[in-house]
Amino acid sequence: MSVLNRPIGVLVMSYGTPESLEGVEAYYTHIRRGHPPTPEQLEDLTNRYRAIVGGVFPLRENTNRQVEALQRTLDEQAGAGRFKCYQGLKHAAPFIEDGVAAMAKDGVTEAVAIVLTPQYSSMSVGGYLKRAKEEAQKHGIRIASVESYHLHPELISALAKRVEAGLAKLGEGRSDALVLFSAHSLPEKILEHNDPYPEQLLETSRAVAEAAGVACWQFTWQSAGQTGQRWLGPDILESLERLAQEGVRYALVAPVGFVSEHLEVLYDIDIEARRFAQERGMRLERIDMLGEDPQYMKALADSVVSAARELDS
Ligand code: FEC
């Protein structure tokens, strides 16, 4: 029987966010691999969450909606019942291991693991997949994985449309605007092992710029951690400082390493970077995030269906 004739579990993985302001400490401790944050670090993070939403954590609902939309897209594309989606989060419940256990409980024996972020790094997507595979092995589930889909034509087209709409927000400034593609920074040590993350991000940015007809663009990092190590740069604030000195007055940020609205977008770009730009006489706008965009869902569904074919071999 072909693999496409039996139900296959789809472990859809995302970062995770706290349940409430009281849950921030446990969440932060998990991110820090069991080391609790100092009171100052905890206060800083709690204040950032307060600044964006005052106690609501948008990533939770956004991820729920994305997983539901992917299920609908897979049902349409492959037929209802062929795939069943389960959620697995990196730093919050339901954790990756909970998602795999839920599949096992339902009798799933074959599955595809996919992370919602499009570009691969050994430190990000690689870490999610390792946990998924280890847990699947314990339950006797055969698992195929999607490592990246950063150049899928539907993803590029969805992002290009958002760049075009974002430039339109700048009105007359659009013709002088610079598009600043961005993604979460990682410690520089990933470069020691030829990690594909920086190159994949540049490839996504280049393809989106080309599809949107944008000639004036740069790539920058954002949201680096305060860990004492060197992180990939330049950071978005350094880039904005330099651009302001060069006379750039309009910038559109396109965070192509993120797929929904959450802290790193709503605080780091919409509050911190925007204020920083304004103080330097620049106007900064951001593209709308992908959320449940049908083209993004198609990119995810195509990636799942082609990974599922590996289960046959
Ligand atoms: O809205 C939310 O509640 C969560 C937003 C959020 C997303 C996200 C995505 C990525 N991260 C990545 C790497 C790191 C590394 C560290 C790290 C730390 C944090 C902290 C918070 C946080 N991250 Fe995150 N990240 C989000 C939130 N991240 C909060 C802790 C405080 C801070 O630094 O602000 C450093 C860990 C360490 O201490 O060793 C590394 C990467 C992504 C994008 C890919 C993905 O979605 O998985 C890479 C969303």
Image: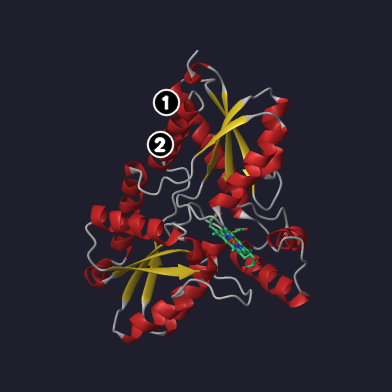
Q: Which residue is mark 1?
A: 77
Residue 25 location (% of width, % of height): 76, 63
**Circle 1/circle 2 CB separation < 8 Å:** yes
**Farthest residue in the bottom direction?**
245
Please name the amino acid that badge 1 sits on. Answer: Gln
Horizontal relation, residue 138 to residue 85: left or right: right
Measure the C-alpha gap from mark 1 to mark 2: 9 Å
Residue at 36%, 75% in the rendered image: 283
Horizontal relation, residue 222 to residue 93: left or right: left
Q: Which residue is mark 2?
A: 298
Residue 139 location (% of width, % of height): 71, 31
Q: Which mark is residue 238?
A: none
Task: Tell me the SS state at disc 1.
Answer: helix
* Precedes in sequence: disc 1 or disc 2: 1
Horizontal relation, residue 276 to residue 50: left or right: left
Please name the amino acid that badge 2 sits on. Answer: Lys
Residues packed near mark 2 inside 10 Å, few (<14), some (14 to 19) or many (20 plus)? many
Decide which of 243, 32 is in the foreground and name it: 32
